[in-house]
Image: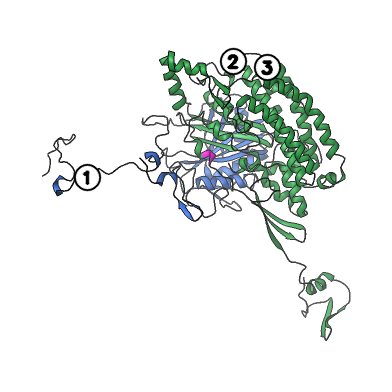
Chain colours: A blue, B green
């Protein structure tokens, strides 16, 4: 009964159910969820085109503005500069130092203490998940502010999914909750953190919601004794 | 402490009699003696304050360890209002993002929008192309919003420290500002009024008149607040010398805004790293040197006065002109207008796209459904929020949706200071100290 296929659509396909003498079957509905929505759809804005993320390349010297002063001061104060700083990127009037993960606490210490750097305030610590970029897909960014010189700089480290980053809480105590949030949302482990627990999600939550391979979906909710499934698993009306 | 009755005790010998235990004291360690006979002396109580508690400004939970009335340990627990705003942003286009971020810190929605829009504009490289009128409107509205946020602070803190009438007055005056917002954007809160590229629609004349009236009305009310609170002995006792945090503590814990300025450091991003043309306005940065709740109260009242000065200057600068960037690839095509049922497309625009110009319809459809593309890269933009530094870290991968947006919300960072301010103090001072940070859980948990 097999139908010879030449690689295209089988033109002489038997109707479904014809071989078992049963009424023609309704083909299985691939749609599911409310209003036939499956998954979260293509929200990339690329309309199904393959995305190519351009590689982040280091910027050539001179960087311009105060960026040269900052990098020169750090190079002078930190003998391991060439080893610890993977690349220096200047983009949109912002300076980013890509730091080796194991060196971040040392670099932060010098950034805070050196007379010509003086980044007293750690404004923000957060993560970005660059899924499908390379093995070190989880990035942690530190935004430092120098109140003395009115400058800003971004430190960035990249680690694999099960990678660890030394905590900067001993240098900047304000990083405490922000590192907890980054752990909670991305699963980056901060070694040496005094209390690395979840902060925004419940303690028994599984997964790290801000990762790119974590769907937007939902969780079942109990309401007045009945369990309400998440929107993408509710029954279909059509 | 030497164990009672132990052989090595040099201080007191004891013996059992029919009357109970009797000590023969030769002087010295009285703590050992009282400790051994009073089983209640080191009893600790753990109290959960919140997450449902009128004095915790929303769903903040504080786990307090008390010895009598003294707080020995505070552990803030947050996350009860986590709504996943940052995750949701990644599934909407860049313009729709303002509708989400405005809901984070619901007492300062326009600041969330401003921070987000400035970040998107920096990513697009169009910061210089924002029209003067749009920037002036942004400054005007941010300062009005700062006043309304500080008014809620005075209102709720007054209520928590026993000045109930202050709450009524604070909310009454705030309502006036919300009316101005409603007249312009169609909504009292959660406006989505600032958009990447400008503001959604122009200010109507009636709203400008209202702002002028408010500039006359508000200074009188401020005098009333000060007459009500500043000289009042209960207010002074509850705030002076309470929850002190010095500059070192503030910087270590990342605390910014009025709390930092109340401890003496005049760090205000409007002055130190200006944006939206703040460098052209005449205003002072009020500071105090006490570093306590009283100082934070003085700073906030003074900031309301400074904001009124900025509002007045912004009104004088408001020259007719476009409110959106000229680039039609970014500018929202619809001429939005406020109707009786809220904000929507203006009738002229609907008539044009439905009846006259097919190209306009296509353009409208593409820009509204798909949005504009933002070149890949990342930026960090920070603005002076009523509570401190609001930072927005926005990452684009070149698409029409944000790849990642992180909001460094001042409520989240400042809340870490509660243990430093409250441990060792009395239970009642936890309320005063927590209130003086002005945390808003919508922004904290996002």
**C-alpha distance separating marks 3 and 2:** 11 Å
**Rendered location of residue A159, percent (x, y):** 48, 44
Note whether A224 is above or below B398 in the view shown: below
**Rendered location of residue B422, percent (x, y):** 74, 51
| Residue drawn at x 67%, y 47% as measured from the top left | B416
In the rendered image, residue B85 lying in the magenta stretch gets the answer yes
Residue underneath mark 2: B322
Which numbered circle lies on residue A25? Answer: 1
| Residue drawn at x 74%, y 49% as measured from the top left | B431
Single out the mark in the foreground, 3 or 1.
1
**Helix, strand or loop at disc 2?**
loop
Identify which residue, B103 or A23, lies in the foreground: A23
Residue underneath mark 3: B318
**Rendered location of residue A79, percent (x, y):** 59, 39
Are the residues tagged 2 and 1 within 8 Å (C-beta)?
no
Looking at the rendered image, the quarter that the C terminus of chain B falls into is: top right
Note whether A233 is above or below B260 in the view shown: below
In the rendered image, residue A172 lying in the magenta stretch gets the answer no
**Helix, strand or loop at disc 3?**
loop
**C-alpha distance separating marks 2 and 1:** 62 Å
Highlighted magenta segment, given as a residue range: B81-86
Chain letter belonging to callout 2:
B
**C-alpha distance separating marks 3 and 1:** 69 Å
Chain letter belonging to callout 1:
A
Which numbered circle lies on residue A95? Answer: none
Q: In which image quadrant can residue B5 be found?
A: bottom right
């Amino acid at each position: 009964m097999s139908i010879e296929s030449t690689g295209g659509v089988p033109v002489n396909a038997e109707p479904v159910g014809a071989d078992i003498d049963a009424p023609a079957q309704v083909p299985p509905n691939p749609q599911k969820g409310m209003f036939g929505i499956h998954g979260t759809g293509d929200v990339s804005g690329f309309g199904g085109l393959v995305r190519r993320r351009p590689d982040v390349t280091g910027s050539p010297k001179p960087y311009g503005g105060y960026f040269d002063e900052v990098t020169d001061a750090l190079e002078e104060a930190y003998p391991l500069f060439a080893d610890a700083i993977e690349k220096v990127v200047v983009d949109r009037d912002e300076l980013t130092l890509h730091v080796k993960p194991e060196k971040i606490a040392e670099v932060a210490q010098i950034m805070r203490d050196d007379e010509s750097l003086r980044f007293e305030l750690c404004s923000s610590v957060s993560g970005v998940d660059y899924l499908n970029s390379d093995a070190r897909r989880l990035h942690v960014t530190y935004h430092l502010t120098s109140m003395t010189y009115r400058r800003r700089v971004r430190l960035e480290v990249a680690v694999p999914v099960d990678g660890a980053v030394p905590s900067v809480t001993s240098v900047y105590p304000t990083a405490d909750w922000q590192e907890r949030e980054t752990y909670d949302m991305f699963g980056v482990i901060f070694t040496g953190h005094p209390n690395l627990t979840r902060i925004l999600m419940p303690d028994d939550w599984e997964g790290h919601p801000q990762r790119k391979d974590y769907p937007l979906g939902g969780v079942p909710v109990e309401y007045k004794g009945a369990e309400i499934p998440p929107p993408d698993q509710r029954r279909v009306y059509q | 402490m030497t164990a009672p009755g132990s052989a090595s005790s040099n201080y007191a010998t004891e013996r059992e009699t029919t009357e109970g235990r009797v000590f023969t004291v030769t002087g010295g360690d009285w703590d050992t003696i009282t400790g051994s006979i009073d089983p209640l002396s080191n009893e600790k109580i753990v109290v959960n304050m919140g997450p449902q508690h009128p004095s915790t400004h929303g769903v903040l939970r504080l786990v307090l360890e008390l010895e009598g009335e003294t707080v020995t340990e505070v552990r803030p627990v947050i996350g009860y209002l986590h709504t996943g705003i940052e995750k949701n942003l990644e599934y909407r286009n860049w313009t729709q993002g303002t509708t989400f971020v405005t809901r984070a810190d619901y007492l300062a929605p326009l600041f969330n929008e401003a921070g987000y829009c400035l970040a998107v504009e920096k990513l697009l490289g169009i910061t210089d192309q924002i029209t003067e009128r749009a920037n002036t409107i942004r400054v005007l509205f941010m300062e009005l919003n700062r006043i309304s946020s500080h008014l809620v602070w005075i209102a709720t803190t007054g209520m928590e420290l026993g000045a109930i009438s202050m709450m009524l007055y604070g909310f009454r005056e705030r309502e006036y500002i919300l009316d101005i917002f409603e007249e312009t954007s169609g909504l009292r809160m959660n406006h989505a009024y600032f958009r990447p590229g400008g503001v959604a629609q122009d200010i109507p004349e009636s709203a400008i008149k209202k702002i002028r009236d408010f500039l006359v009305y508000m200074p009188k009310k401020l005098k009333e607040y000060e007459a009500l609170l500043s000289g009042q002995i209960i207010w002074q006792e509850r705030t002076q010398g309470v929850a002190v945090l010095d500059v070192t503590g503030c910087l270590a814990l990342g605390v910014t805004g009025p709390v930092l300025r109340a401890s003496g450091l005049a760090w205000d991003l409007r002055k130190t790293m200006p944006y939206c043309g703040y460098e052209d306005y005449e205003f002072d940065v009020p500071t105090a040197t006490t570093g306590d709740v009283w100082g934070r109260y003085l700073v906030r009242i003074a900031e309301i006065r400074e904001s009124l000065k900025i509002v007045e200057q912004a009104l004088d600068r408001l020259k007719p002109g476009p409110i959106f960037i000229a680039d039609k690839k970014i500018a929202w095509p619809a001429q939005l207008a406020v109707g009786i049922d809220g904000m929507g497309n203006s009738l002229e625009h609907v008539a044009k796209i439905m009846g006259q110009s097919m190209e306009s319809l296509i353009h409208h459809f593409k820009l509204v459904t798909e949005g504009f593309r933002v070149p890949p890269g990342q930026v960090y933009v920070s603005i002076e929020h009523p509570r401190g530094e609001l930072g927005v870290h926005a990452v684009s991968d070149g698409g029409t949706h944000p790849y990642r947006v992180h909001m460094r919300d001042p409520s989240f960072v400042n809340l870490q200071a509660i243990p430093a301010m409250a441990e060792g103090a009395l239970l009642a001072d936890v309320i005063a100290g927590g209130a003086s940070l002005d945390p808003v859980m919508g922004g904290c948990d996002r």
